[in-house]
Image (cartoon, helix red, strand yellow):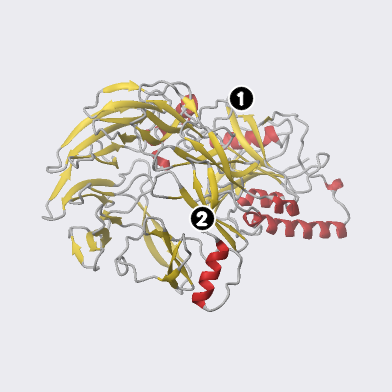
């Protein structure tokens, strides 16, 4: 990772004298525009590098489909034997299907991507041309399949919650809770007091689910959201002959009330409802953590997004009466400290039903702690100057906790898998390659899949034992087609923030024909840098647009400036930025291009666009931010400000960029 400072040999700007004759310019511009649109289709040039495991009955073996140009192969992987073999004899299957269908199949590979095991995994059920078949894996005798027993059952849709026994689906209709029978579609109304802006919810919110069934399916924990006092903003529709105004909810306005959340336990057979006391502070959020295995208590977290206090509470299943399990104060808001903004949960109960692992940022660094259900601290499990991410798996039998963390101080955004014993000893990193790692444990807990990539390395999938031992690389993305794009990997860099001491980490993109002796205009995208390979579907994806825009003759880059909520670096970085929205973002976004690529000229934060279907001529519109002019010495002015636009795409992603406006 390179560290850039002022004067490093890369003054990237455009001079008039550098431009070629007009005819050559036109040809170059045509080539650049063509390359821009090709880079927007970057993901189509990257093949493979992903595995979707379908676990088998032994809890360790699995199968996955590899699709190579209509030549589908389904692999069976046995981690215990460290083997990977085709699950089907494709030739025999083709012959058997041809006899049943009456004609030859057109492709050499399998005619399906998914299937279901039947008869104790000795046969499979699959669909070809809207007809279901069953084939024996021993004899390859094939027959038409009977109608499945599940046919006609209602399935839970997104935003609905299926009961543990599969009999009922909890949903919301006309602001109230309803139950739909999965067997026959019959509906039962659970509540009748919901109205607009004071309504029941069961949907999976981005910080936690709004409803959870008890283990036996007899009680539904659900929330009722009260927006009646929350501020609203008007949305004006100008597309019709007459403008129409819709008032939209907006619960993030300082000084005004935000939404209130009520939690209730509803006994489904009787319809009896128990209101749960969730917290003393108005506007507290409720994050449902789950039920104890015996269904006696519901555990939930009560906190305020921008408050530093958090309480873990338990509600009695029969009465709704709550007890305080633990309460603590964090040096930064709980929302940032524990990572609820990313949907991570701080609470994981052990199988013994008496202890739990708690993720806490009370020291300034997120770490793991072992508690009993009475709220007594048993022991810290991790410690040190690094942030823990989330608990991936608990192996109570072997005594291990598996979790993600950012433990490499030299690369504070790399995410790896670690494990530590329930005794707080033996902390070990289990993944190796730099970058981001996505972990999928086998149900047996004996093995895991590690899908990893970095900005300069395409994704690969490794099979490892639970102790981290590498068994084999299952898949690696094929990037040979990128040669046609003259692609070179993005570059990572480190630069100091406007305070002159805080390291900021960024990613830089160059045009396909970059030459170190030429000068280029610079675009700084003010969204956060992402650190996976562009087009990686298995991990947080590096946006396509920065690389595409660079092909028009720019240098584009993004950097993680000091901003609250979204950093999660922990320690002093999070403490300084907590509750400081707008204080550091603009100064850092201005000083970075000066330091990296803009030795002089006005740095303008301007509007932008994002997304694979973006156009470089898109209109700039939306919110307002500011910019600071820079003098010839590279000093940021502290008095003069320019108001410019903030790009807002129809897909709700927001991107702004800074440009060296007065270039050398």
> Is the C terminus in the top left, top right, bottom left or bottom right quadrant?
top right
Q: Is residue 579 visible?
A: no
Q: Residue furthest bottom?
A: 102
247 left or right, relative to 530: left
> Which quadrant of the view contains residue 388?
top left
83 left or right, relative to 330: right
Q: CA distance from mark 1 to mark 2?
A: 58 Å
Q: 557 or 419: which is nearer to us?
A: 419
Q: Nearer the viewer, mark 1 or mark 2?
A: 2
408 left or right, relative to 207: right
Q: What element does badge 1 sit on?
A: loop
In the image, residue 581 above or below residue 125: above
The percent position of residue 206, horizontal first and vertical second, equals 39, 47
Q: Is residue 136 visible?
A: yes
- Which residue occupies 60% across, 60% down? 613
The percent position of residue 276, horizontal first and vertical second, equals 18, 42
Q: 632 or 54: which is nearer to us?
A: 54
The percent position of residue 386, horizontal first and vertical second, equals 48, 26
- Which residue occupies 56% across, 47% down? 541
> Is the N terminus in the top left, top right, bottom left or bottom right quadrant?
top right
Question: Which residue position holds label 1?
Answer: 500
Question: Which residue position holds label 2?
Answer: 87
């Amino acid at each position: 990772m390179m560290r850039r400072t002022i004067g490093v040999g890369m003054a990237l700007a455009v001079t008039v004298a550098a431009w070629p004759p007009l005819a050559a310019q036109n040809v170059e511009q045509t080539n650049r525009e063509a390359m821009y649109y090709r880079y927007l289709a970057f993901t189509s040039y990257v093949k493979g590098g992903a595995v979707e495991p379908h676990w088998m009955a032994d809890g360790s073996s699995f199968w996955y489909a590899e699709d190579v140009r209509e030549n589908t192969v389904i692999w069976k992987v046995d981690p215990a034997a460290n083997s990977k073999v085709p699950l089907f004899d494709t030739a025999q299957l083709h012959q058997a299907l041809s006899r049943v269908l009456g004609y030859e199949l057109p492709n050499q590979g399998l005619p399906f991507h998914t299937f279901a095991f039947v008869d104790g995994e000795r046969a499979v059920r699959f669909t070809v041309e809207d007809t279901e078949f069953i084939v024996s894996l021993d004899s390859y005798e094939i027959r038409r399949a009977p109608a499945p027993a599940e046919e006609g059952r209602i399935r839970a849709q997104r935003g609905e919650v299926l009961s543990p026994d599969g009999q009922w689906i909890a949903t919301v209709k006309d602001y109230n809770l309803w139950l739909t029978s999965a067997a026959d579609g019959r509906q039962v109304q659970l509540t009748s007091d919901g109205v607009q802006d004071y309504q029941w919810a069961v949907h999976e919110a981005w910080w936690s689910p709004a409803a959870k069934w008890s283990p036996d399916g007899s009680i539904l924990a659900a929330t009722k959201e009260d927006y009646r006092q929350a501020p609203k903003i008007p949305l004006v529709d100008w597309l019709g002959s007459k403008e129409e105004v819709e008032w939209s909810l907006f619960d993030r306005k300082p000084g005004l009330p935000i939404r209130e959340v009520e939690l209730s336990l509803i006994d489904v057979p009787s319809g009896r409802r128990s209101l749960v006391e969730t917290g003393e502070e108005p506007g507290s959020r409720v994050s449902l953590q789950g039920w104890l295995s015996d269904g006696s208590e519901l555990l939930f977290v009560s906190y305020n997004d921008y408050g530093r206090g958090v309480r873990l509470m338990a509600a009695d299943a029969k009465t709704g009466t709550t007890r305080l399990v633990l309460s603590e104060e964090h040096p930064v808001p709980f929302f940032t400290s524990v990572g609820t903004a990313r949907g991570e949960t701080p609470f994981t109960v052990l199988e013994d039903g008496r202890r739990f692992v708690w993720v806490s940022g009370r020291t300034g660094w997120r770490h793991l702690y072992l508690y009993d259900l009475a709220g007594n601290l048993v022991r810290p499990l991790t410690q040190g100057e690094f942030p823990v991410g989330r608990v991936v798996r608990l192996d109570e039998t072997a005594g291990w906790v598996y979790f993600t963390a950012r433990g490499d101080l030299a690369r504070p955004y790399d995410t790896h898998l670690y494990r530590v014993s329930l005794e707080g000893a033996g902390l070990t990193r289990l993944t190796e390659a730099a970058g981001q790692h996505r972990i999928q444990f086998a149900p047996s807990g004996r093995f895991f899949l590690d899908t990893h990539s970095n900005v300069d390395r395409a994704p690969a999938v490794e099979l490892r034992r639970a102790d981290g031992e590498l068994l084999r690389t299952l898949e690696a993305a094929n990037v040979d087609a990128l040669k046609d794009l003259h692609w070179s990997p993005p570059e990572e860099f480190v630069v100091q923030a406007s305070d002159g001491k805080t390291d900021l980490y960024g990613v830089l993109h160059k045009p396909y024909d970059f030459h170190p002796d030429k000068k280029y205009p610079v675009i700084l995208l003010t969204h956060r840098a992402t650190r996976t390979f562009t087009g990686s579907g298995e991990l947080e994806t590096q946006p396509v647009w920065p690389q595409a825009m660079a092909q028009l003759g720019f240098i584009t880059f993004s950097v993680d400036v000091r901003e609250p909520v979204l950093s999660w670096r922990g320690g002093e970085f999070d403490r300084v930025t907590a509750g400081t929205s707008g204080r550091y973002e603009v100064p850092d976004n201005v000083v970075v291009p000066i330091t990296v690529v803009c030795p002089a000229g006005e740095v303008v934060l301007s509007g932008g666009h994002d997304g694979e279907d973006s156009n470089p001529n898109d209109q700039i519109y939306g919110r307002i931010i500011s910019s600071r002019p820079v003098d010839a010495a590279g000093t940021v002015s502290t008095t003069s400000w320019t108001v410019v636009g903030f790009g807002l795409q129809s897909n709700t992603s927001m991107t702004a960029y800074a440009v060296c406006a007065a270039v050398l």
